[in-house]
Each structure stands twice: as structure tokens, then as C-alpha cells.
Image (spheres, grey):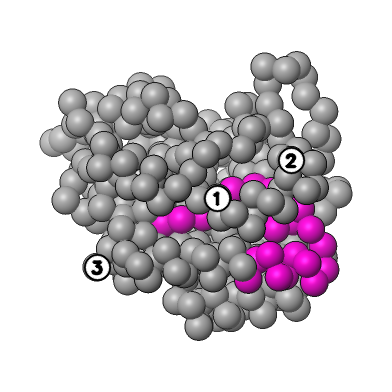
Amino acid sequence: MGSIAETPQGIDVHHHFIPECYAKALDATGGDPSGWKLPNWSVAASKDLMQAHGIRTSILSLTAPGCSILQGAPAATLARAVNEEAHAIRNADPTAFGFFAALPPVEADATAAVAEIAHALDVLGADGITLYTRYGPGTRYLGHEHLRPVWAALNARKAVVFVHPTHAADTRLVNAALPQPIIDYPHETTRAAVDMITSGVVRDFPDVNIILSHAGGSLPFLATRAAHLLADARLTELSAEEFLTYAKSFYFDTALSGNDFSLPLLLAFAPPGHVLFGSDFPYAPTPTIATHTVAGAKVLAEKKGEEEVDLAANALRLLPRLR
């Protein structure tokens, strides 16, 4: 059995890169607060992974915490440097690479974030924008009112937004074997998704196409529970049916979710045209990526005869530059 992405036009929408400017800034600020170690990365390593799994194009992005490790002008300068590096990699091999652009901390300076959106999408031709699930020292998730100017700028451009989880406000580890990406990251994605629904972001900015990482975290498992509880307890004006319609409007990547349990649940929940391939390279170890891509291919093969899910075709519809 081959890879979940193994088609002539396999596209990986969850593929990170680590430019030197970011690695240096992260080290200078004390490292990743999630507890995850910075892996080695190079363009050649990305291409090796792509060849192993039949991936034609990888869309590069900066993982969390991203440029939020800095504030003010230094954060904006770092975001610009990251995006210029991604732009150079893309231009050197535009078939192999695209990129979702980085932003300075969006809750602290929406004006700077909007300026970088304009530069990244209008000047550099980025394939989309990366947002993290939460910003600042508290609980400002993606539905927070301070982020509305950012969503408006994205909506005006009909942008693709790649939502990647970041650490929770409390960074204390349960134990040394549980850095936050293991369990907490999927739940952070779920919090952000439900916040975007209940705050009206998904309703008010309908031209933004939002990709949720890691099969939407626990959203496919919890969406029906949340939909009915929120409606029946009158915590939202949305009916359960409206909530679920918005929940299914997201796109979902398969990073670390191509297994016999997670992927069938996602395929039962999401529209078939909203499922995309993701590897989570290089933060996911290559054996883990192989395990999930091979298992995912088996699950998809067993869907033959039902409503077929074509991950590459889905990505091509979402990312027109790659057609």
C-alpha cells in the first residue's frame, strides 16, 4: 500500500519549514513554549519526504508559536523575513513548493498584520495565510473582536487561511512525556473552531476558506455534542443544525490523522471535497508520517465505490495557482 498522497499531483498543505531567521529568534527567546524540540530542516529534506510519499507540491508554513515570540516592530520584521525566504524557496521551484505566509501577532497590532497580509498575498503571491489558534497571554482565540480587521482583510481577498494550533495559555506540562503537541494541540484547534463559529467569524467572513490542522482536532468527535448543548442551553442563537453546517464548512488536513480511527470519523463528518493531505513534516518524525500516510491510503482505498475522496483534486480546487 502506498501513501495517502500518492498521486501524480499529491499536495501537502501541512508542511513546515524552519528558516534560519526564525530558528535564531526562537532560540534567543527561550525555545518553543509547547515543550517540543526544534527539528532539523532543509529544502533537500523536504524533497526527500515528498519523493517518499508521492507528493508533488508542499505548501510551506511556520509552525507555532511563529512570530508571536516577538512583539512590535521586531515581530513584523521577522514575519517579513520569513515570508521573503518562503517566497524565494517557492520561486526557485514553484512546482514543488508554495507557502502560507506568516504574520506578526495579530491581536497586538492588527494594522501590522493587515499590512503583512497585503504584502504576502498581493506582492509575494502567497498561497494563503497562517493563523494560530490563540494569541496573547490570555484566551484570545480566533473569534476575538480584536481580530476582526484581520478577518476583513482576508475576506476581501478570498484568502485561504491555514489554522495551526499553538500552546494553551497555561504552558505547564502534565509530565515530561506530554509536551503540548501530543494531546493539547488538537483540543486547541477545536476551541478555536468553535470560537470562530459561535463568535460569528465563519458567518461574517464567508469568503475565507479555513483549513483546520490534524483532522480538525477533536471537532468531528465533539461537534454534535457542542451543537445541541449550545442550542438547548441557549448559549448561542445558532440552532444545532446551523452550528453543524458551519462546522462542516471548514477544510481539514490529515496530518497525524491517517489511521483506522481518526480518518474514518473525519470522512464521515466532513464533505468529501473538504479533506486535504497533510504530513506535519519535519515536526512529526518521518516514521510517524509513514505510519499515518500508509494507513490513510488503506482507509481511502476502502472508500472506493462510495463517495470518493480525492485529496489532490480537493487541494487543486482550493489553491488555483497549482492547477
Q: CA distance from mark 3 to mark 1?
A: 26 Å
Mark 1 residue type: Ile
Q: Which residue is mark 3?
A: 323
Task: Report x, y in % for residue 294.
Answer: 28, 27
For the record, the magenta segment spans 59-80
- Residue at 82% from the left image edge and 68% from the top image edge: 72
* Residue 311 highlighted magenta (yes or no): no
User: In screen coordinates, is 102 left or right of 95?
Assistant: right
Task: Report x, y in % for residue 108.
Answer: 82, 65
Q: Which residue is mark 2?
A: 31
Given residues 264 and 74, the one toward you in this image is 74
Query: Mark 3 against mark 1, which lies toward the viewer?
Result: 1
- Residue at 79% from the left image edge and 41% from the top image edge: 30
What is the residue that sits farthest to the left in this orientation? 305
Asked whether disc 1 touches disc 2, contact meaning CB atoms under 8 Å apart, the reply is no
Task: Report x, y in % for residue 121.
Answer: 51, 77
* Residue 168 shows in the view: no
18 is higher (above) or lower (below) than 216: below
* Residue 173 shows in the view: yes
User: In screen coordinates, is 149 left or right of 62?
Assistant: right
Q: Which residue is mark 1?
A: 18
Question: Split into 4 quadrants, where in the image is the N terminus?
Answer: top left
Mark 3 vs 2, N-terminal side = 2
